[in-house]
Amino acid sequence: MNYTKCWLEYPRICDETGKTLTAACLLTGTVAWRAVEELRLGLEGLYGLTLETTAEQTADITLDCDPRMHPEGYNIRVYQGRCTIVSGGERGALYGAFALLRQLQMEQCAWEELTWEGKGRPANPMRVLNHWDDLDGSIERGYAGQSFFFRDNEVLVNDRTVAYARLAASVGVNCVVLNNVNVRGAANQLISRRYYEPLREIQKILASYGITMYLCVNFAAPMELGGLDSADPCDDRVLQWWKDKASEVWGSLPGLGGFMVKADSEGQPGPSAYGRTHADGANLLGEAVAPYGGKVIWRCFVYNCQQDWRDTKTDRAKAGYDFFAPLDGKFRDNVVLQIKNGPMDFQVREPVSPLFGGLKHTNMMLEVQVAQEYTGQQRHVCYLIPWFRQVLNQDMHCCEGPSTVADLVSGRSYGNTCCGMAAVANTGDDPNWTGHDLAAANLYGFGRLAYDTTLTGEEIAKEWLRLTFGKTPLVEETLLHILMASWPVYESYTAPLGIGWMVNPNHHYGPNVDGYEYARWGTYHRADHKGLGVDRTSSGTGYCSQYTPELAAEYENLETCPDELALFFHHLDYTYRLKSGKTVLQHIYDTHFDGAEQAAAFLTLVEGLEPLLPQPVYQRLHERFRHQKEHSCEWRDVINTYFFRKSGIPDAQGRTIYP
Ligand code: GCW
């Protein structure tokens, strides 16, 4: 095995070798079997205990079913070495098993000493990992090696597939989209006889962990694959082609969750070529997959990527809302719209997409990115869960009842169930799965947060640290500090005050303030000698008005617009004083000096852990933190010099800014 078990290592807590416990499982099925198997593994690792299954009523551990409960929920009671896990179904039993093992590790007690009542009930119906894996084995925006699903246009099925499914299920993930949303080359043929057999193997493994498989399809598949001369959603031949295709696909892959589509986005084909709407497009597929209980996950990442930088009226931030809000209520109920957290694209800071507040009769799902495309690419540490938690907490003020993003995407606001949270995954075939060892906290955290949106970033970090590193106080304290500081620190030495980008084109790594300034992608900072920022108020692009009135007013008005989004919403002079009391320019200088200093401090802290960490882990961390320290100086100097040259205003504290 050339990969780690991440947070499922189950290091020994205390030695109870020689003792045997019994488990009775009153649920049947492969997922329930996995639950027992996990308990066996966990108790063996944590205590050296042997777990035997029994049919007796008097078992030490009983897994029981209560059909009145949520199928993915569980109630656990443990007292004096006896434990019952009651769940609404097999998935609940599996999640209960993982929860019990987690609790034992949090408390670090002997098996007989645990006294605990725990409950779980998923906040979100769908908890999805999106893999941007290509069939050739590369991963779009992958920073942890190659794909473990595909290589050389073949599907890989091996022990790593099982290890992956187990990791995903352990944090409550219940849907996995295997392939990249950009469907190119051989990926077109995933829905053809060429690939059904190995896909069925993967599907079986995932299903045994309670995970439903989805595939990304090309909207133009009727042409690419079917030889039709059109993919027009209103053409009967096209509908028939999709219906036949769906019948073939589900005939070979029964239980498939459905299709995910990126249409009319960044060069991917879509309904607009035929003058049709996204509702026409999504419903076409929705109709075709409906007989099999299939769903269509339709992405809302649609914007004009051929913009002219001279055009200051067009605003990419407005595109998602403009395309989709007018279609509210027009989508079939097996279609779910997947919306990125912000209106732009996974920047280190963005406001929440106004589209969450603009759809009342449409299923929606929140999309976040744990792959750190714009947040350090798994070379810098950036623990994103506190950020996702903020996104979930944002009140959209869009309906009478509960109206936070968490309420809206979980289905609580309007009572729907085809909805939830999705994350672009950060995994690859690197031995530690995520490149940076600390990036695994984002993978872990996404699942935990999607299952229970009331958990805080800090609670999740503490769990992950304990499960990953065992109980070593200095390691836990130090890494907790680093994780919790990491997102603000990354933000402080990169693009300031919500403006985003300032990265090198294409690969998106490292500072380049004007990298996208004259490009066609619609991502501008508009800096000149007097100031910077994009005016998105009513005197500018008008983007603010896409929010419901409370939020629109908050952002429109400089007095109430939060500092951290000041330049996202407003074009400000360098000398403008923020609520913090600092000028915009001095804020930029200060945060960049400070951020780089903190990145350097991270390295020192990590060096203090050398004797306490396994050598390979330490080596990997050390290499990355050394790079982060250096690279944050590059960010600091490029940004500071750029704004010093534009403004001619020196740093109030006289620190080194290269002329
Ligand atoms: O952030 C951008 C990425 C693209 C990606 C796209 C998307 C898969 O740079 O690589 O394409 O988002 O979300 O579709």
Image: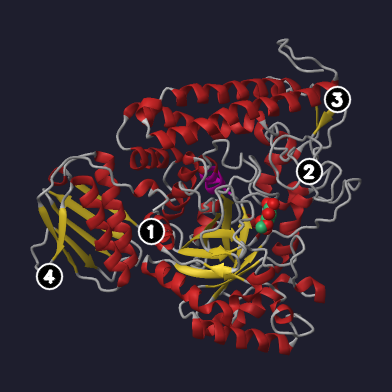
Which of the two labelled residues, at mark 4 and mark 2, occupies the earlier sequence position? Answer: 4
Q: Residue at x 36, y 69 (%)?
A: 208
- The residue wearing badge 3 is 646
Is 236 on the left or on the right of 134, as rendered?
right
Mark 3 neighbour density, 10 Å: few (under 14) some (14–19) many (20 or more)? some
Question: In which quadrant will I find the C terminus?
Answer: top right
What residue did someone put label 4 on? 55
Compute the Cα span from label 3 to label 2: 22 Å
- Sequence-wise, the earlier of marks 1 and 4 is 4
Secondary structure at badge 1 equals: helix
| Cα distance between the residues tagged 1 and 2 | 45 Å
Mark 1 lies on residue: 166
Tell me the kind of residue under disc 3.
Lys
Which kind of residue does numbered mark 2 sit on? Answer: Arg
Residue that mark 2 sits on: 536
User: Residue visible at 51% across and 59% down?
Assistant: 148
Which of discs 1 and 4 lies nearer the camera? The answer is: 1
Tag 3 near tag 1, CB within 8 Å? no
How many neighbours does mark 4 have within 10 angstroms: few (below 14), some (14-19), or many (20 or more)? Answer: few
Relative to 559, say whether 509 is above or below.
below
